[in-house]
Image: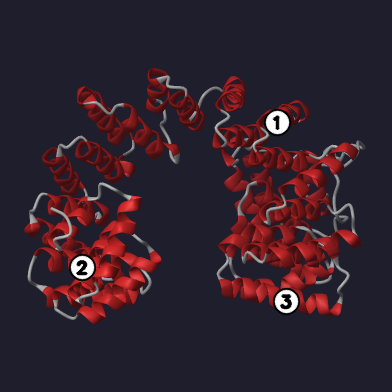
Amino acid sequence: MPLFHCSPFRPLSALGLAAILSACTHLAPQSAAIPSQKQPEQRQATPQGSFEAATLYALLVAELAAQRNLPQVTLHNYMREAERTEDINITRHAAQLAKQYRDPKSRLKAALLWAKLEPDNPEPNSIAAAELIRKGDTERALPLLKTALANGTLATIDALSERGQKMSPEERSSYLTLLDQLLEHEPAQPKTLYAKASLLRFDNDLSPALTLIQQALNLDPQFDRAILLEADLQARSGHLDTALGHLREELNQRQHKQMRTLYTRLLLKKGQFGAAQVQAKLLNTQHPDDHNLLFYLGVLMLEHNQVDSSATFFNQLAEQFGTNSTLHYYLGRIAQLKQQRDTAVQHFQQIGASPYLIAGLSELGKLLNQPTDETQLRQIYLDSRNKHPDQSPTLFALEAGWLSGQGKQQQALRVYTEALTLHPQNTQLLYNRAMLSEQLDDLAQMEQDLTQLLGLEPDNATALNALGYSLTDRTDRHQEALILIRKALKLKPEDPAILDSMGWVHYNLGDDLLALQYLLRAYEHYPDPEIATHLGLVYWRLGQSDNAQKIWREALQRDPDNTQILNAMRQAGLIS
């Protein structure tokens, strides 16, 4: 996980700088000769030539910045000189620095320049293709991907696999079309087969993906990524035992961190918790310095309710690093699950940074859930807002939500009003106060807040629907409601809540057949009690009492005490 990825800044060595500046010996003192010890590995010998004084000065400043732990200055100077001089050695080094400092924008820029300077070198094309894939720039990535795959590079394949889940169907289809073309020309390419299978997985085409992976493994039985993907696909396809058997065979023959990690995860999925814990301990023993792995194992164990094992891994991280916000969150969750309330509260209170700040305070609200906890909890929210002003609207909303959950709606309303005094254009606060005002029968305040929200975000489908539904449900302003709901439905045509609103407004306008069409679509998407209530009332008014009773009884089986359903049945005279 990124939080525990140790990547200390490594300044450039004097040898590395000397290699780049080897052409500048006429500018450097003769006493600064390169020592005879072994040079750092370089992909290509430094070309002979000379740099102007300005370039030498810029790179010396970059080296000084590296020694002073100022990587932004180092990378900036190398990138600027690479673009200005188009020197291949500086450009190549700029690309390496951008990778080291995790700057994808600079890495892409350096790789594209490198490819321009060395058009026959597959490495810069592979780097650029991978960065473009991650960016979602399909149009520019496709021609580079073809070159990269032809040279068998794995970086672009990994980028495709990482990006796969985020791709739109159209983006995925573009890559699949290219891969099909490559396979038609050269069908016996394991890496291309793997790339296609990894994308098909995200379309849930598991069977053809598995066939492709098995073809790849027939061509290259030691293709590690394909072995991992095969096991994953087998597990997803319901053949968990087969996946475990294949991984077990591989691990009997060799040590492989990723395979053992997947094996551990699948053992947990199988419910073989003891065996999984043995594997997790073995991973920890074999890779004691892999903090990302340790963190992953802690999360994995927690996800499968192996609380003690999870605690062991997180406590080990705490011993090595000291506690930080991430560890406080997970140790708090563990204490919470072990019914150690005070310990959990202490951990959650010590979370001081995103992304766990809000999650930790939410859990804290569940622990401090008694009326006597109100003073303590509200002070915690106040302190958090003072420390994290950028999170102030969300923290106000958490406090108001806690008060509302305690039945203190008026106090919650005052919190929202205070929040909106400080953040008058925050649409989430406006929406929350509007919904609370509707609960308190203050329809004027509700309408005012939703109208203000829509002035800020005219295409906010949720707000359009909320205002439209409230107008048709709580007033006789059905035509105004219809306009609002129609606009919301145009923005989100398959949203069940909006379909329900459209059905309900037509019911209130007396068009029962049209109401029935919308409500049936809504119920098909989401058989919610409120939608069931509305659908049953339409059926009842149409004289289809059997259908109405069937819908209501189905809803009551899922939620026997639902007041909306029971009130509708009383309204129909079915119960007293």
Task: Locate residue 495, reporting x and y percent.
Answer: 35, 68
What amino acid type should be assigned to the residue bearing mark 3?
Leu
Q: Nearer the viewer, residue 115 or 233?
A: 233
Dot 2, how many residues are within 10 Å of its Cα: few (below 14), some (14-19), or many (20+)? Answer: many
Q: Is residue 8 visible?
A: no
CB atoms of marks 2 and 3 within 8 Å: no
For residue 263, above or below residue 452: above
Q: Nearer the viewer, residue 373 or 233?
A: 233
Amino acid bearing label 2? Leu
The span from disc 2 to disc 1 (Cα, nearest Å) is 56 Å
Q: Tell me what residue is drawn at x 63 percent, y 64 percent.
A: 204
Q: Earlier in the sequence, mark 2 or mark 3?
A: 3
Q: Indicate which disc residue 537 carries.
A: 2
In the displayed structure image, the side of residue 546 where residue 243 appears, left or right: right
Please provide percent x and percent y for residue 427: 25, 57
Q: Quadrant of residue 322?
A: top right
In the displayed structure, does residue 521 sit left or right of residue 418?
right
